[in-house]
Image: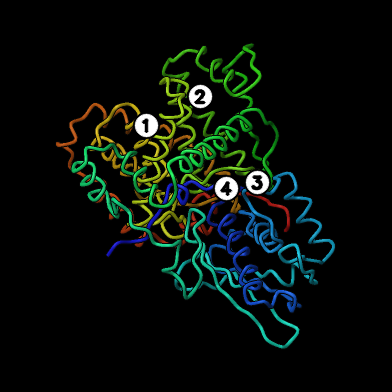
């Protein structure tokens, strides 16, 4: 049986940080609930709304901005277009006014402390990231719906787990890496070309290319912004932003006025091993510092791992002469298919699988994209993805203070460097001699996820989260 059909735009989604599963997912769930109220024609009858957060959403929800995302989603705001500098002012107004305007149409009384509840000791069986919305109506009835944020910004409604977007007839149905390789060998197409053919089942080539260009625009704007913004990250850990100072130190007195001139300046710094490592780290830091600051980022495949794919793509652009629309599309399409295979065969959710499901998958995606763009065969592309994930197996998710900052931000630099190393290894290896397949690693990652203790799955109940003394402000 074919699994869920996943598009490049399901893997790469524009949104607001700091977490795809704890911010973007709950935001989308809140939007869906309000839309459900409108569809049922009961929105004007709503007198009170209560929100119940379970499991990982409760335990690390405040640090991940789950409460903020839900308030904005219920208000009718969209994470793709909402102005990031209005996140704070709007949510503060809801707190102080005790008013919430559902879908920007119907105002109700709303006490955040009393109506948005963190049920730290309760979990629902389907997935650790669960939220229930309850709307109480003036006619005495109530509407209650439960949603699960299953990783990467994907959301499923209870009772409708199998319902996603409309099914289409894909020319190359793919659930596994072996499926993908079968189609490549049968047609002679590159992985990116197979992906494009499948995308054409949903929309025109022009629409797909424009959509991928929009994704790249968001990626490069995020990197550029992060490399030029100083300060301290919000949340109480007092983590200083490092990308801007590193960018300045690496560039010295070179001047530029925009992204394209910046790329030229970066290239002029040389391509020594140390310099390249510093730049890759700078790129990854920039994205995840933006993510931690409620900036606009792209799930790749998640927010917590949003820096790996952009950093490796930026490395390709700056140091491998990869700055062309065609090559960028090739990179992102290839990367997206690897993320899709992991979602179908395992998980993209740290609450289900630990950080191997986020940084590990993003590293595999980036390694695959880079390898195809550097001329690797289809087998070498899959080998690069396998190598990258193999050396992330068992990686735990233990965010200090429930914030997507420590160790999350630096972990993106590690994932990016591993992706480049995996690509180089694959390009210098005959894949016929490989002992481990990508499908075997996907299966192993899922088995490892099932075996992993829950305290290492985005709960902040274990690991660094309990061994680093901190004092966060009261929420």
First along the sequence among labels 3 and 2:
2
The quadrant the C terminus occupies is: bottom right
**276 relative to 40 in the view: left or right:** left
* Label 4 vs 2, first from the N-terminus: 2
Quadrant where the N terminus is found in the figure: bottom left
For the residues labelled 4 and 2, say whether their Cβ atoms are less than 8 Å apart. Answer: no
Disc nearest the viewer among 4 and 3: 3
Q: Residues within 10 Å of mark 3 (few under 14, many from 20)?
A: many
Q: Which residue is mark 2?
A: 279
Give the residue at x 58% y 64%.
29
Label 2, label 1: how far apart the Cα atoms are: 16 Å
Instruction: Classify residue 282 as left or right of residue 454.
Output: right
Residue named by callout 3: 294
Q: Which residue is mark 1?
A: 370
Task: Work out how far the residue at label 4 is from the one at label 3, CA to CA, in angstroms.
Answer: 10 Å
The residues tagged by marks 1 and 3 sit, at their Cα atoms, a distance apart of 28 Å
Label 4 Cα neighbours within 10 Å, binned few <14 / some 14-19 / many ≥20: many
Q: Nearer the viewer, mark 1 or mark 3?
A: 1
Q: Is residue 13 above or below residue 58?
A: above
Check disc 4 and report its element: helix, strand or loop.
Answer: loop
Which comes sooner in the sequence, label 4 or label 1?
A: 1
Q: Position of residue 410 (x, y in %)?
A: 51, 37
User: Please, which residue is most extreme toward the bottom here?
Assistant: 140
Is 411 or 158 nearer to us in this picture?
158
Q: Secondary structure at mark 3?
A: loop
Res 360 visible:
no
Compare marks 4 and 3 and give the one earlier in the sequence: 3
Q: Report the front residue among 64 and 174.
A: 174
Between circles 2 and 1, the one closer to the viewer is: 1
Q: Nearer the viewer, residue 430 or 176?
A: 176
């Amino acid at each position: 049986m074919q699994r869920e059909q996943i598009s490049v735009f399901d893997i790469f989604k524009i949104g607001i940080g700091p977490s795809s599963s704890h911010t973007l997912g709950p935001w989308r769930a809140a939007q869906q609930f309000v839309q459900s109220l409108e569809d049922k024609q009961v929105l004007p009858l709503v007198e009170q709304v209560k929100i119940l957060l379970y499991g990982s959403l409760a335990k690390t929800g405040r640090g991940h901005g789950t409460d903020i995302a839900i308030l904005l989603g219920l208000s009718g705001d969209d994470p793709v277009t909402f102005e990031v500098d209005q996140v704070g002012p709007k949510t503060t107004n809801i707190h102080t006014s005790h008013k919430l305007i559902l879908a920007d149409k119907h105002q109700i009384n709303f006490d955040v402390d009393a109506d948005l509840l963190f049920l730290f000791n309760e979990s629902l069986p389907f997935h650790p990231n669960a939220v229930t919305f309850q709307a109480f109506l003036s006619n005495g009835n109530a509407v209650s719906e439960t949603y699960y944020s299953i990783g990467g910004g994907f959301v499923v409604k209870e009772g409708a787990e199998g319902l996603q977007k409309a099914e289409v007839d894909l020319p190359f149905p793919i659930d596994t890496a072996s499926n993908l390789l079968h189609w490549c060998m049968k047609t002679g197409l590159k992985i990116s070309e197979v992906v494009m053919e499948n995308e054409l089942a949903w929309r025109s080539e022009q629409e797909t290319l424009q959509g991928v260009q929009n994704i790249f625009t968001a990626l490069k704007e995020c990197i550029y912004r992060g490399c030029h913004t100083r300060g301290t990250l919000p949340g109480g850990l007092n983590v200083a932003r490092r990308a801007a100072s590193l960018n300045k130190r690496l560039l010295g007195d070179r001047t530029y006025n925009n992204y394209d001139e910046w790329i030229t300046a970066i290239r002029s710094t040389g391509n020594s091993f140390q310099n390249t490592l510093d730049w890759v780290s700078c790129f990854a830091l920039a994205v995840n510092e933006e993510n931690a600051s409620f900036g606009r980022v792209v799930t790749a495949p998640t927010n917590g791992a949003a820096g790996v794919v952009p950093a490796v793509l930026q490395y390709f652009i700056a140091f491998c002469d990869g700055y062309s629309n065609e090559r960028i599309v090739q990179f992102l399409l290839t990367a997206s298919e690897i993320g899709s295979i992991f979602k179908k065969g395992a998980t993209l959710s740290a609450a289900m699988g630990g950080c191997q499901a986020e940084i590990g998958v993003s590293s595999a995606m980036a390694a695959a994209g880079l390898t195809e763009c550097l001329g690797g065969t289809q087998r070498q592309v899959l080998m690069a993805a396998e190598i990258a994930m193999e050396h992330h197996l068992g990686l735990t998710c233990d965010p200090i203070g429930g914030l997507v900052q420590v160790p999350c931000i630096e972990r993106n630099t590690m994932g990016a460097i591993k992706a480049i190393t995996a690509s180089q290894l694959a390009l210098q290896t005959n894949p016929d001699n490989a002992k481990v397949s990508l499908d075997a690693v996907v299966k192993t990652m899922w088995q490892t996820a099932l075996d992993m203790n829950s305290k290492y799955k985005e709960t902040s109940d274990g690991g660094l989260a309990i061994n680093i003394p901190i004092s966060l402000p009261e929420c």
